[in-house]
Amino acid sequence: MARFLLRRLLAGVVTLWVVASLSFGLMRLAPGGPFQRDKPLAPAVEANLRRTFGLAADVPADAAGTLVQFLVRPGQVVQRGQPIAEIRLQNGQMTKPSAVSDLTVIALVGTPGRVLKSGDPLLARATSAWEQYVRAMASYARLDFGVTYASEGTETVLATLAKAFPVSLELGFLALLLALVLGVSAGLVSGLYPNSRLDHLSMTGALLAVSMSSIVLGPLLKLIFCVHLRWLDVGGWEPLALDWPHTQVKILPVLTLGLIYAAWFARLTRAGMLEVARQDFIRTARAKGLPEHFVVMRHAFRAAILPVVSFLGPALAGIVTGSTVIEQVFQVPGVGEFFVTSAVNRDYPMVMGTVILYSSLLILANLLVDVLQAALDPRVRGGHD
């Protein structure tokens, strides 16, 4: 088992790196950019922000003296070896520092007459995609996702996610709990009493839920219970709040996100119970005179629940990704809200932070599902040793 866990952890790290790399590349390939706005920023402000976000880097002066003039202008593409400025040294001689590599000028730093020290910045240049990638991956390895564009460099991505993550975590946990309790219970009853009225009723409800998307179910429930009946409100989610005003706003988001997966759990549990009921070890247990509830819960249910455990991984993935839509529909201030707005505004650090957060959660969830399967099924455990 230890070897299996180590392999899965290493595979998870590689998967996380691949996801981060693909996301980084796709964002750069998408049209538009974070600084394309209706009201453009001042060149100096934009240059400072670009340096903050790793989209620009300084070109330093290679000598001390007084800046006489710049020989380039913002937006110009400069070839390697081309002079970029003229500096008067302390002994009165003139020098012209040149570009050490091809570059694109973002902004000029300082004005003529400025006294420079060796190494002071002369201009800001655009960084290449490879420079941005290497810097970004090194930062992510240190759990440093930088600052958000929306805050113009005043708030870090981790600080923003720390405020929103408890909301998304509570929504996902409650939805998964609802799906497991409701789905497994309905499937267990259907499996114990096949072709009964309870079986037909629960399976009909499960079929309807499976056939409906959360994108349709959410607005429909909102229209019925919030607009027409006015039984429930939307907005005002407070994590772990138990009073009714804060609890009632959680009902519809949790129902919308959990009902569809409850239907899948019900169908899987019913199929598992019907399959296990025909096994020899169940007939043997009953032939020994064991109580029916002992046979069902101790032997049948433990084997029948394995398909549900296997489906926990995809269910968790669906709940995590589906919560983004639900948070938008029901105005839940979770991570999904920041993910959508940051994607629209090309807020690269925020998008990468949310993508890596979601990916890490899914990788850990699938690892926990594998461990749970191994604990329930000795055959699986033996295969991992």
Image (cartoon, grey):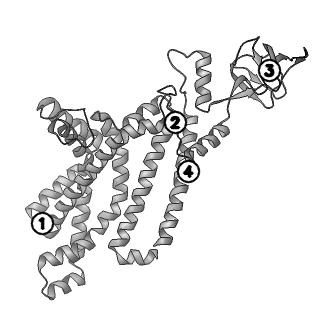
Please name the amino acid that badge 1 sits on.
Answer: Asn
Q: Secondary structure at mark 4?
A: helix
Residue at 33% of width from left, 49% of height from top? 319
Please name the amino acid that badge 4 sits on.
Answer: Val
- Mark 2 lies on residue: 349
Name the quadrant containing residue 116: top right
Q: CA distance from mark 2 to mark 4?
A: 17 Å
Residue 311, percent across and down?
A: 33, 60
Q: Residues within 10 Å of mark 2 (few under 14, many from 20)?
A: many
Which residue lies most toward the left here?
197
Q: For the residues carrying marks 3 and 1, which lies nearer the camera in this image?
A: 3
Residue 75, percent across and down?
A: 69, 19
Q: Secondary structure at mark 1?
A: loop
Q: Secondary structure at mark 3?
A: loop
- Mark 4 lies on residue: 18
Q: For the residues carrying marks 3 and 4, which lies nearer the camera in this image?
A: 3
Q: In the rendered structure, are the residues bearing label 2 and label 4 in contact, judged by CB atoms less than 8 Å apart?
A: no
